[in-house]
Amino acid sequence: MTRYVYQFEEGDGNDRARLGGKGAGLAEMSRIGLPVPPGFTITTEACNTYQRLNRVPDGLMDEVWTHLAKLEEKLDRRLGDTKRPLLVSVRSGAPISMPGMMDTVLNLGLNPDTTRGVAESTDNPRFAQDSYRRFIQMFGNVVMHMDHGRFEAILEEVKHRAQVKMDTELSESALIEVINGYKDLVWKETGQAFPDDPKVQLEMAILAVFDSWKNPRAIVYRRLNKIPEDLGTAVNVQSMVFGNMSVTSATGVLFTRNPNTGEPGMYGEYLTQAQGEDVVAGIRTPKSIDEMAVEMPKTHEELNQVCKLLENHYRDMQDIEFTVQEGVLYLLQTRGGKRTARASVKIAVDLAKDGTITPKEALLRQDPEQVQRLLYRQIDPGAHVEMLATGLPASPGAAFGKVVFTADEAEARGLAGEAVILVRPETTPDDIHGIVQAQGVLTSRGGMTSHAAIVARGMGKPAVTGCEAINISVVAEEFRVGDHVITKNTVITIDGASGRVMLGSVPTQEPELADEFTELLTWADREKRLGVYANADTPEDAAKARELGATGVGLCRTEHMFMGQDRLPVVQAMILAETLEDRQDALSQLLPMQQSDFYGILKAMDGLPVTIRLLDPPLHEFLPHIMETEEALSQAKQAHDEAAAEKFDAILRRTKSLFEFNPMLGFRGVRLGIVYPEIYAMQARAIFQAEADLLNEGGSPHVEVMIPLVGTPAELARMKTMVEEINHEVADERHQALPYQIGTMIEVPRAAIVAKGIAEHAEFFSMGTNDLTQTIFGYSRDDAESKFLPTYLAEKILTENPFMVLDREGVGRLIEWAVQEGRSVRPDLKVGICGEHGGDPTSIEFCHQAALNYVSCSPFRVPVARLAAAQAALRN
Amino acid sequence: MTRYVYQFEEGDGNDRARLGGKGAGLAEMSRIGLPVPPGFTITTEACNTYQRLNRVPDGLMDEVWTHLAKLEEKLDRRLGDTKRPLLVSVRSGAPISMPGMMDTVLNLGLNPDTTRGVAESTDNPRFAQDSYRRFIQMFGNVVMHMDHGRFEAILEEVKHRAQVKMDTELSESALIEVINGYKDLVWKETGQAFPDDPKVQLEMAILAVFDSWKNPRAIVYRRLNKIPEDLGTAVNVQSMVFGNMSVTSATGVLFTRNPNTGEPGMYGEYLTQAQGEDVVAGIRTPKSIDEMAVEMPKTHEELNQVCKLLENHYRDMQDIEFTVQEGVLYLLQTRGGKRTARASVKIAVDLAKDGTITPKEALLRQDPEQVQRLLYRQIDPGAHVEMLATGLPASPGAAFGKVVFTADEAEARGLAGEAVILVRPETTPDDIHGIVQAQGVLTSRGGMTSHAAIVARGMGKPAVTGCEAINISVVAEEFRVGDHVITKNTVITIDGASGRVMLGSVPTQEPELADEFTELLTWADREKRLGVYANADTPEDAAKARELGATGVGLCRTEHMFMGQDRLPVVQAMILAETLEDRQDALSQLLPMQQSDFYGILKAMDGLPVTIRLLDPPLHEFLPHIMETEEALSQAKQAHDEAAAEKFDAILRRTKSLFEFNPMLGFRGVRLGIVYPEIYAMQARAIFQAEADLLNEGGSPHVEVMIPLVGTPAELARMKTMVEEINHEVADERHQALPYQIGTMIEVPRAAIVAKGIAEHAEFFSMGTNDLTQTIFGYSRDDAESKFLPTYLAEKILTENPFMVLDREGVGRLIEWAVQEGRSVRPDLKVGICGEHGGDPTSIEFCHQAALNYVSCSPFRVPVARLAAAQAALRN
């Protein structure tokens, strides 16, 4: 026969599945000799069988009575005894904590006779009647499903008649009046008398706890928190202790360390002369646990010892419930305490340093996503906010400022020291100068890879994109959302971590990179096998990345360098060139600019590899929009400005000729390099000249030239030959060998499929998982995230957004294939990823398993990537 | 030692590689006893060794002299003998025919002494001098590289002085004057005397032929025709016969059957009293070979016998050169004759029917691409054309008509019986009614998969798209191209097979589907293992496809049904619906329309499978363009038409909300079905109701429901459940089982990668190779073909356009994977392809090799697909 009931000290403290979290904790504390009021646990199995059979499982109640008898013997009290009555609490306790979701009954065992017994044995008749009153109310509500408010009404009425305000002011006789009123209410509402037989009370309470597993709020909670339906709850029947018995009694809750900061030392609250529910009800303000050192020094010291013991035992910070009954300490619960990211890091590092856990355990205990938040300014979690709308969480961090609608104004006022938020329908390369000077960016269009999102993430600046609820009029300099009209200069706050847009300046918290965090990351570096590189397009980004622990640049995009205010006109001239000669002219103006860009990045990363991707985006991204140009052209014509008209006409013709239906799949990447080899040639020359400059100064640049969007071995072979020629030219000019590696981004499925052929020419592969995800799924990210992905996620067609978490079955499979094929012809092929997935912990675990060499992510994700890489190594 | 020289009768007639085509033919004819003037062949190996060493190979000339001696003995004539001089021709002959590319010398062996000998032995001094004159001119030009025109000038001068017009009118003495002039010229130009020694002449001529392998025009010809550079040419040294010796002498060229029509019987021309070059020079008009039956009946009969013998021997139609010398027939060459597609089919079928070849050989001898042209109207190859521009060959066929610029006008005038060509920047669903009534379509934008291209191909109507050289003003109703301004009503001709746009009405040729072709295709059906289905969206298309031999519809696109004039407003109402109820309203209007569409197609294909794809394109394709709507909105506002303004405003908002950056990768296919299940539900209901109707009438519909753009098993599972429910509903309503199959299109790489999971739910896969090619390469076809693909093909980065010829290494590999994975869980999984590749012969061969079940192509490609499928089966 299955055994359903265990005395606390019989239970296995690790068997949370059968005993529930609370039961396992009570068992464990009992076994190690802590002062736990005796009791027993009815297993989750009993609950599940009850649910399945829809009746009380055979033998369950017999077992309960047997264990009750043991309990009575232990305490020399009997349930229902009028001299030494046993009172118990009946509490639920699921394997996974569901705070407040299920039911608890205290003071069970009281009836008129036992109440009298309690009054006599405690010599405190008022306490006895108050306990009985509380019991009827709680039992009536929880077990008999009566409305809590009806009981409160009776209590209020008696208080009113007695002309008192507080429950504690009621006399014994007034309490008896309340009790009688409660009993009448029970009779009227349920048609039956309130049960006097304590055994009936106990059985009813146990079944009520079982039933509470299926109450609607518990079902919703489980769905929200992804807790399986079939776990069931255990039931803990525990002898009562009373924090409300006397002035030397108390009840409280504490953490063994500060759950906000992780600082060592108890952190909690208590109330004297109170039961647990009084703390929750907030009738009196609890005292800090520190006050207990003065008020109840012995208990305080005992708690201190208990905390140390529990921490040593559980090897983690604990969250404890306790009661002091007439100076004697009892523990009612212990569990791992919830904590902030900051506390999580500090606690784990402290525990590791004092030898309680190993550094590996300290690493494994961190949730990388939570840790990530340490690196960004956050909305104060306690702050009141007035929500305006929610967009896509495009770049984490919180910022507030005055709304402005043009990049020029953002730049001017930002430079003048004002905090502004740039609000645009979408941003373009023309807006970069404004983004740089704004506190954050808000757009009504575009997804997680829109221009605004990418640029903001690159700068570590908060951004909310695709906030379609707001209706922007750039002309009127206002936006509308719901009933609000937000005009220029209104202060708003954006939270790029959640996508929230709020009115006014909401308080934010500064990020801190505590010493413990730094220490934890050095431990991570010892464990991880993957290199962690950063995506960095500027010397500043590269320096930041290096500071955050990156050991290389995995992706240096050269196009952002083309977008500077000084460069764009030259880039446009290059694109508008109608002859090779004109294009060469423009390119030769760009050469020194690019050379100094590359020099700066190589210098910032001196001694570490820097992977420079040659120009990738379609050329039309550098030209103004067709409609803007048409506007400008018609204005120039009206003004009879023929020179301007000619210029705009040329731009318009070129823009139209570059128009693409699906730019994502268009004329970009190596396709530019094949059709306009002179562009890539200029970039290669700039790279090698920068390398030569740095070598001259005694630096050790590690140059990796990356050809983007290759789909056939022939493309790469062609570009490789050209880059090699230019390398030889510059080496000859500078009388110096200029070592470099050449490789490609694997961004289209075909590149992965024919990886063997490509690896013949490539010394490294960088998996461009953003584009790979787009092409493998056939999803344009911008379109998908605003159109159908939300439905797909809500309806569980997809379990994760594949742009956030690498899709192992599809994208991952092809990456594994590419790695295998590539290394079959070039065993030392270096492989990394440089998509957004490079900063996502589960994707990083995949990269580890797929035997990649490194991941590359935005500088601000480097710490989390180091941590995730270490966890991947430790887990696999 | 390698042997370099073979007497004709010693050679192996199959060894074209060593003897060249001409040498092998001469050898073969000699061996089977046909009257071939004796001679010998110097192998291609000699030529190649000569090229490699850059000198005459050791022993070559010794061998030549030995074989010359044999030849002299055989004929009892000696090279250089003054009594019985031997004259020879020296001709090149490569393994692959390169007509006119290399050199020939006739009458070699003449000098003043031998000329006298010829004069005496023929008793025809004028003939002797004329031959000598021709020899010097030809040798001087071909061997000594002198300008042909300088010789002609001397000839003209003598004719002028002699006051004659024709060469044949020149007297013996005048010819001697010419000869002396020629010799002086040679001396002046080359600094050496014209060689008198026939052996020197022969050696020089042989080396000149070797050298001619490397002449620039031969190199260009080989590059254009993909002939390898290392084949080399053989040299044939053959005793001369003279068609110009007397009135009973003649020379001619003939085909053993008519090379244009394939009709049996000799087809050719001859000239009496002439040498081969006279025919080429066109001085006299040759006579038809039929005249020979009267003029030289004995020779005519001999030729007839020779033709039969050669056809039987070579088992194919032959192209023959012959000379008659004083009534005696000599054969100088035989080779497989070039022929039109029509002749190719007829000849092969005729040969197979008379047992000369097998039906399998008849099938293998066809070039499917060439055969395809039989099915379209063509530009008369001999017609003079005035080119305007060249666009993309979007839909084959030729058409002419008056230029019109709107679909409405095209429809009105087309219906009125006028031939019009619809010219648009691009076409949209709104233009369909105009395309239907136009002879053809010309667009300045869009690629091979643009709307115009797809619609025109579907209708079998000529189209030229992406013709960027033309600048259309719809407002002015004209287009400009170069210096031309083409106004409305100007007649132009378009050739959709080549992309040519021509001025005026160029003569075209009607297609014919000869009986022989039909017969050949029935033979093909016996051999092929692949099914050939058609892509058909209407009952008319389906009927056409069935007539052309399709055994099913592999792709019935339902979206084109949405574009009819009567449907579009309802479709738009459905899209603009803001509530599910409104959408259901519109859908219930569409239901009967779709039902009758499906009924018609199922009926046309009764008894054969019809694969119906549920709605695929993004919804914005059914809405007007944003700019048009903005225009309409602002007009409505100006006119204070509030109802209209409200309508356009609603359309505008919806269109904007449906805007996509990359529609190809956007909100389409099953993504619509997941987000708006009611649309697919309506389509499923329409399908099953149509099936029930047809079953009721005793038909046997074979319904296959295809869910497009699936990338995860979950998508298909969800849609399958819904379709199944609707099937049960309709079956219940109609009291009838409604069998069907459900499957998916494999269009995104992920679907292929996770094919195993998808096959759990799919009874068939249809490989959507158009989209697969786009996503695997990361090419948007429209953009790629107008931007970088031309460069890629020109520079051999790609050897073929992957949208025309299936890319085996990339796309093919993933298809093979999908087939294997899919059949691993469902061995009877039916797999086909329905992209444009379904009609491409080499792609069809891939499908055969990859064990697909069928290919599906446009109705007009069905015959060629049947042929290609048979060839694939026969070759593999």
Image (tube, coloured by chain):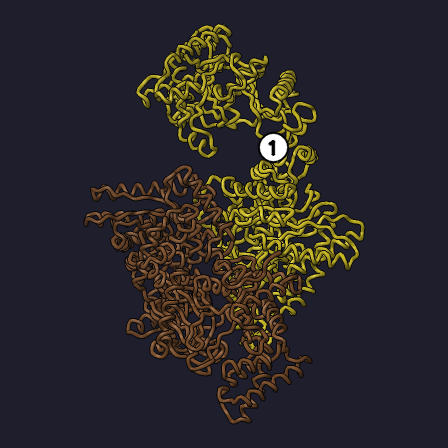
Chain colours: A yellow, B brown
Position of residue B130 relative to residue A522, above or below, is below
**Which chain is indicated by disc 1?**
A
- Quadrant in the rendering for residue A589: bottom right
Residue pictured at 45% horizontal, 47% vertical: B815
State the residue in front, A748 or A218. A748
- How many numbered marks have been drawn onto this rendered protein structure? 1
Q: Residue B125: horizontal and vertical position, in percent?
A: 52, 85
Q: Quadrant of the N terminus of chain B?
A: bottom right
State the residue in front, B270 or A31. B270
Position of residue A751 relative to residue A300, above or below, is below
Position of residue A331 relative to residue B607, above or below, is above
Reading the image, the residue beneath label 1 is A366
Residue pictured at 55% horizontal, 55% vertical: A423
State the residue in front, A34 or A478. A34
How many C-alpha atoms fall within 10 Å of the one at disc 1: few (<14), some, or many (≥20)?
A: some
Left or right, residue A704 beside residue B612: right
- Of the residues shown, which amino acid type is indicated by label 1? Gln
Q: Is residue B787 visible?
A: no
State the residue in front, B205 or B318. B205
Q: Is residue A771 visible?
A: yes
Left or right, residue A19 beside residue A745: left
Q: Residue A259: horizontal and vertical position, in percent?
A: 61, 30
Residue pictured at 65% horizontal, 47% vertical: A763
Residue pictured at 47% horizontal, 49% vertical: B812
Q: Residue A117: horizontal and vertical position, in percent?
A: 45, 8
Left or right, residue A59 beside residue A535: left
Q: Residue A593: horizontal and vertical position, in percent?
A: 70, 60
Q: Considering the numbered disc 1 on the image, is that residue within a helix, a strand or a loop?
A: loop
